Image (cartoon, rainbow, N blue to C red):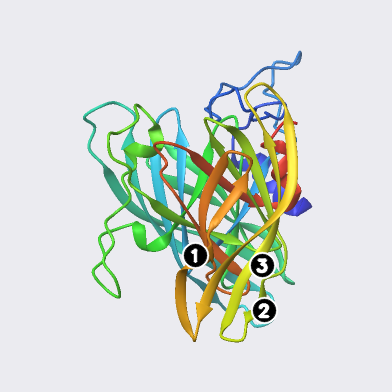
Amino acid sequence: MATFRRMLMALIFCCSAGILLRADEEPPRPARAEQDPSGKARLQDELVQTTVVYDSAMVVVVSDRGAAGVRFFEAFELGNKSGNGVIGVSYEWRFLEGELGAEEETGTGRVFAKLVDGNVRDGSLVVTCGPIELAWAHKSKVSGIVQFNPRDLAVHPVAAHYFAEKKKPFPAAPIDLSRFLQREEPAKPATTAGPVRYGSDVLVVKDANGVATFEFGTAFERAKEANQKLQGVPYHFTLVSPDGETKEGDGEVYETYTNGKYDNDASRLDLEAGPLHITWSRGGDDRGWIYYDPARNLIWCVDKPYAKQLVGV
């Protein structure tokens, strides 16, 4: 991680001082770099990090220029059996400028890291989506790290199949990037899904009720009655209300199966933090899904050690 930070600081232009997302503030928007007495831009000490699982997730990145959707493909390796080679990932992007009436731009790219004895020594580590740039680092064959300054960028998780129109195995329309710009609240809701990893992600949710965090425990399966099974996950929440009051507590969500069939009426699908609710579904033992309308609330999924940099208590 230290190596990644040194390379990141050489590759991206960051602002000074961490920013806290409070219940009475707007979601983070870009700000210009501040200058220290030497005339050099001070670097952000506390960047926010999130892990992207390539086969299930894309990210929507929002800045003052507009919103970009980025979908990653499977990672590739070249001559890397001994830890001396190249590993990377290709991606495609959509970008919508913030101005009303703007048309989307699209493109493709790739990022890669050169490895020496298994350690990153060089590479192309910036994901470019039109005018928006996002830092990337190698993690494994199935996932990568994106790291960003929350004063400059807001990064939201979305299911990968919302990148473009899809007919199979089930229909999906491409995500409307303009909803992430939150210009105005549309008349009709439009729900999208985003993945969350149990045990390693913290889900941060903002709506009119405040800012909430949800930390997930270990997924469970247990019998409720002789013919019923519950499959779900426990969670711990905090809520910072618009007046600054903080609440916290515990809960659980689960899907109920009666006689082997999904039973919606007997299921508990709302993550609750006081009056703030967001819909969940199980997914599997290691990750699940949350459902939201980005025109009405925004969500972040960040690696657990970085959650405090998004929420000020």
Q: How far apart are marks 1 and 3 (CA)?
A: 14 Å
Name the residue nearer the viewer: 273 or 9.
273
Above or below, 187 against 119 in this view is above
Q: How far apart are marks 1 and 2 (CA)?
A: 39 Å
Residue at the image position 57 percent from the left and 81 percent from the top = 228
Callout 3: helix, strand or loop? strand
**Front: mark 2 or 3:** 2
Name the residue that disc number 3 marks: 115
Callout 1: helix, strand or loop? strand
Name the residue nearer the viewer: 290 or 114.
290
Q: Distance between the residues labelled 2 and 3?
A: 45 Å
Name the residue that disc number 1 marks: 89
Name the residue that disc number 2 marks: 222
Residue at the image position 27 percent from the left and 73 percent from the top = 168
Is the residue marked by circle 1 packed among few (<14), some (14-19), or many (20+) residues within 10 Å? Answer: many
What's the residue type where badge 3 is placed? Leu
Q: Quadrant of residue 245?
A: top right
Q: Looking at the rendered structure, which numbered label has been put on residue 237?
A: none
Residue at the image position 39 percent from the left and 31 percent from the top = 182
What's the residue type where badge 1 is placed? Val
Whole-percent x, y for residue 114 in the image: 62, 64
Image quadrant containing the C terminus: top right
Mark 2 or 3, nearer chain start: 3
Q: Is residue 6 visible?
A: no
